[in-house]
C-alpha cells in the first residue's frame, strides 16, 4: 500500500515532525492487517518515509520485513531499528546529498543481523533517472527471502 502522510498531496492535516506521521504509518499497518489478515506485513519507505516505516515496523510485531530507501540516518533517531532482529534491506544512492553514504554505512554497521544493502552508484537522493535500478536492487535483495 502506498499512502501520503498528513499534509502531503490531498491528505488532510499538517506535518507533525514525525509524531503524527508515525501514527499515520501505524494506521496504514492496521488497515493492511484488516484487509489481508493472513499476509505478513512489510514496512518500507523512501527518505523520511523510510524513517517512519523502519521505526514503526521495528516496533510492530505484525511486521516481518523492513525496507529503507535513502534513509536519513543522520537526521533522525532510529532507536527501534537499531535494536530489531527483523530482516532489514536498504537502498541508498552513492551521491545522496541528504543522506550521505558514509553516514548510511556507519548506521548499517550498528544494525543487528539480518541486514543487506544495495548501493546505487552515481544516484542522488531522488534517484533521478535511476529509479529502475532501485526496483532491480529491491528485487535482488528481497529475492533472498524466498
Image (cartoon, grey):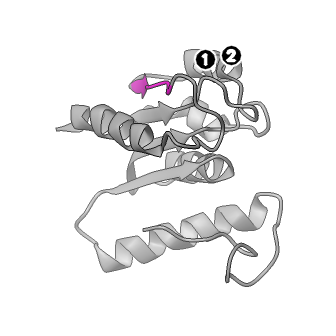
The region drawn magenta spans: 115-120
Which quadrant of the figure has residue 117? top left
22 relative to 119, above or below:
below
- Judge whether residue 70 is colored magenta: no
Q: Say if residue 61 shows up in the picture.
A: no
Which structural element holds mark 2?
Answer: helix
Q: Residues within 10 Å of mark 2 (few under 14, many from 20)?
A: few
Q: Residue 37: which disc? A: none
- In the rendered view of the protein, which quadrant contains the N terminus? bottom left
Which quadrant of the figure has residue 87? top left
- In the rendered view of the protein, which quadrant contains the C terminus? top left
59 relative to 108, above or below:
below
9 relative to 92, above or below:
below
Would residue 85 appear left or right of 48 to someone viewing this image? left
Report which residue position mark 2 lands on.
102
Q: Give how far apart the Cα atoms at labels 2 and 1 are.
A: 5 Å
Q: Residue at x 49, y 39 (%)?
A: 130
Position of residue 9 measured from the top left corner of the image (x, y, whole percent):
68, 76
Q: Residue 105: which disc? A: 1
Which structural element holds mark 1?
Answer: helix
Would residue 74 appear left or right of 5 to someone viewing this image? right
Q: Nearer the viewer, residue 79 or 72?
A: 72
Amino acid at each position: 500500500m502506498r499512502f501520503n502522510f498528513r499534509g502531503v498531496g490531498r491528505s488532510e492535516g499538517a506535518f507533525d515532525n514525525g509524531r503524527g506521521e508515525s501514527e499515520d504509518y501505524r494506521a496504514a499497518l492496521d488497515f493492511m492487517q484488516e484487509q489481508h489478515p493472513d499476509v505478513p506485513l512489510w514496512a518500507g519507505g523512501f527518505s523520511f518515509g523510510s524513517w517512519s516505516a523502519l521505526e514503526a515496523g521495528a516496533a510492530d510485531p505484525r511486521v516481518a520485513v523492513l525496507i529503507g530507501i535513502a534513509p536519513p540516518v543522520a537526521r533522525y533517531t532510529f532507536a527501534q531499528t537499531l535494536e530489531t532482529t527483523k530482516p532489514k534491506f536498504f537502498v541508498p544512492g552513492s551521491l545522496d546529498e541528504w543522506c550521505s553514504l558514509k553516514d548510511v554505512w556507519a548506521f548499517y554497521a550498528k544494525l543487528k543481523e539480518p541486514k543487506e544493502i544495495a548501493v546505487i552508484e552515481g544516484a542522488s537522493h531522488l534517484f533521478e533517472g535511476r529509479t529502475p535500478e532501485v526496483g532491480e536492487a529491491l528485487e535482488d535483495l528481497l529475492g533472498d527471502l524466498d
